[in-house]
Image (cartoon, grey):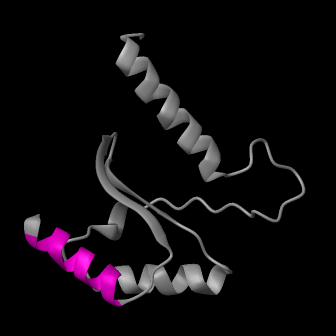
Amino acid sequence: MERARKISLRDMQQTPTEIVLFERGLDEGYSGILVSFHKDYSSYSKLKERMKQYPFLDLSATTNFIIDLKDQIHYRYLTFSTLASNLIEMEEKKKIGAP
């Protein structure tokens, strides 16, 4: 696992990537998550092909979820300011001992 982490970090530093999150985790049937942003489907397909070069990744149980950020209907826009506000609020609650 340590070898895989080093290879991934090296490659992401050497080659610009669309990946914004790549972490291990626990779920029924899955062991990680990768979040990436792409200009178009072709860019997304190229990333999927690049992922095949890593023998330590089991891509056989991969599930994809694609959204169109140009869609007319949004339930909540993706913004990092929302994430930042949430993180700040959690830290403030932790400091005062609130749940």
Horizontal and vertical percent for residue 91? 41, 28
For residue 45, which quarter of the picture? bottom right
Q: Going by the picture, which residue comes out furthest to the left?
A: 2
Is residue 35 depicted above or below 52 in this figure?
Answer: above
In the picture, measured across the screen, residue 78 lies left or right of residue 36, that is: right
Q: Is residue 27 visible?
A: yes
The residue positioned 32% from the left and 56% from the top of the image is 23
Depth check: give the residue in front, 51 or 90. Answer: 90
The residue positioned 45% from the left and 79% from the top of the image is 48
The residue positioned 47% from the left and 81% from the top of the image is 47
Is residue 29 depicted above or below 93 in this figure?
Answer: below
Horizontal and vertical percent for residue 42? 62, 86
Location of the C terminus by quadrant is: top left
For residue 5, which quarter of the picture? bottom left
Q: Is residue 6 magenta?
A: yes
Horizontal and vertical percent for residue 15? 38, 89
In the picture, measured across the screen, residue 95 lies left or right of residue 20, that is: left
The kind of secondary structure the magenta stretch mainly shows is helix
**What residue range appears in magenta?**
3-14
The residue positioned 11% from the left and 64% from the top of the image is 1
Q: Is residue 51 magenta?
A: no
Depth check: give the residue in front, 19 or 64. Answer: 19
